[in-house]
């Protein structure tokens, strides 16, 4: 590595590498990759695009300046969009050519360049983009998986500067290890998706987008809870990572329910409903032999996501704080999604009615604090709803 790269920068890189290797979850990993890349170049903002169905889909966006304008604990809401892999946009060009693009000033791109800068987001967010570094994320076989774009590098006094050749080298090293970690996380995610797919094959009500949304809402609510209860942010991120996977598997126990009951079109008879309720304990039994954080959490989510705050839920009738937090949060997330979406037996409810129902069930079916947090992060939940549409 180049000699001008300082010791503290090297140390930072090693620490970030170690962090990435610990993270299992894809979404959190992307957030961390972006945070790490921004730190190495002291960049104010950045985005990650992943290549999906030959388009660059935006997956994460961070912006320190815009974040600082929000109240503490609030998370930035950014628009969801995708770009073509062509030479018209900066990220598209970087993906097409498979090499980094270092732009000193977005508003002074020479006219003869094939790509141009779209100032629309700057205008919307009252932000000024100047320097840009777009970097391709490639696997060891050279296949492109996405683009990492950093915005507004800053000098030690916080003044915006151009990205240097050193920045490019550091971000390139970081990009390589990030790609490896991304591939590994994708594998873990794939295994869990296979488990949920199995559940879906048995019960068409539990679809892939549904479990992704429930897991997304659940972790968003947990992040709020963690900031309110002063859980250090690193610890909260690690826990969210595990919780997301556990929440995805909330109904995996349905694989053990007889088809005649699981797929019955009409209302269940009382005896059949009793059998249906056992999906909670069946799910829990899939994870209870092991002692990892994930197994403990997945056991609790399966076992308690139908318990009610007032003690009238199933399978045990646990009450209030006796229900683990993971079950209390998943309960709200699961019901919010079920009511908001069309199911074979019901139409999607209008949002107003869904929110009314959740408010009414506060301190009855749901933990009142979780309901509070739910309403606090509603804009972020709506965004998750958009990110995983039913197919
Ligand atoms: Fe369930
Ligand atoms: Fe569900």
Image: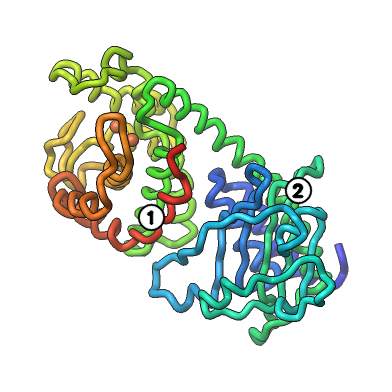
Task: Point out the image quarter for the N terminus.
Answer: bottom right
Q: Is residue 266 above or below residue 306?
A: above
Instruction: Please indicate, yes or no, whether residue 327 appears anywhere in the rendered image.
Output: no
Q: Position of residue 310 (x, y in %)?
A: 12, 43
Mark nearer the viewer, 1 or 2: 1
Residue behind mark 1 = 382
Q: Position of residue 240 (x, y in %)?
A: 44, 50
Which secondary structure, mark 1? Answer: helix
Q: Is residue 259 above or below residue 212?
A: above
Towards the viewer: 135 or 373: 135
Q: Residues within 10 Å of mark 2 (few under 14, many from 20)?
A: many
Q: Quadrant of ligand 1?
A: top left
Residue behind mark 2 = 138
Which secondary structure, mark 2? Answer: strand
Q: Residues within 10 Å of mark 1 (few under 14, many from 20)?
A: few
Q: Is residue 80 above or below residue 268?
A: below
Q: Position of residue 317 (x, y in %)?
A: 15, 34
Q: Quadrant of residue 299?
A: top left
Q: Residue at x 26, y 22 (%)?
A: 278
Instruction: Please indicate, yes or no, whether residue 41 appears anywhere in the rendered image.
Output: yes
């Amino acid at each position: 590595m180049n000699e001008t790269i300082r010791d503290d920068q090297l140390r930072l890189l090693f620490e970030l590498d170690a962090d990435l290797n610990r993270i299992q979850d894809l979404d959190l990993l992307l957030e961390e990759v972006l945070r790490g890349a921004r730190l190495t170049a002291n960049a104010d903002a950045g985005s990650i695009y992943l290549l999906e169905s030959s388009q660059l889909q935006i997956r994460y966006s961070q912006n320190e300046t815009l974040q600082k304008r929000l109240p503490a604990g609030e998370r930035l809401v950014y628009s969801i969009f995708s770009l073509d892999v062509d030479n018209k946009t900066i990220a598209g060009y970087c993906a097409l050519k498979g090499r980094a693009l270092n732009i000193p000033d977005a508003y002074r791109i020479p006219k003869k360049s094939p790509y141009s800068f779209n100032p629309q987001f700057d205008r919307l967010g009252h932000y000024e983009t100047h320097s840009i570094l777009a970097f391709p994320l490639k696997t060891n076989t050279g296949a492109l998986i996405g683009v990492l774009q950093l915005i507004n590098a800053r000098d030690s006094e916080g003044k915006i500067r151009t990205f240097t050749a050193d920045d490019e080298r550091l971000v390139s090293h970081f990009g390589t290890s990030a790609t490896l970690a991304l591939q590994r996380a994708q594998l873990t995610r794939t295994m869990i998706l296979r488990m949920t797919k199995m559940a879906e094959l048995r019960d068409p009500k539990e679809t892939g987008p549904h479990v992704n949304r429930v897991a997304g809402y659940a972790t968003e609510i947990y992040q709020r809870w963690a900031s309110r209860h002063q859980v250090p942010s690193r610890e909260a991120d690690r826990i969210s990572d595990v919780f997301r996977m556990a929440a995805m598997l909330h109904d995996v126990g349905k694989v053990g329910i007889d088809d005649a009951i699981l797929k019955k079109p009409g209302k269940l008879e009382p005896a059949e409903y009793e059998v249906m309720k056992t999906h909670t304990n069946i799910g829990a039994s899939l994870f209870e032999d092991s002692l990892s954080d994930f197994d403990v959490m997945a056991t609790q989510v399966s076992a308690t996501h139908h318990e009610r705050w007032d003690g009238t839920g199933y399978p045990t009738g646990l009450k209030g704080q006796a229900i683990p937090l993971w079950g209390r949060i998943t309960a709200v997330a699961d019901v919010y999604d079920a009511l908001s979406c069309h199911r074979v037996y019901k139409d999607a409810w209008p949002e107003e009615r869904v929110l009314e129902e959740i408010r009414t069930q506060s301190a009855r079916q749901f933990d009142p604090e979780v309901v509070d947090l739910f309403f606090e992060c509603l804009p972020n939940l709506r965004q998750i709803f958009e990110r995983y549409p039913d197919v």
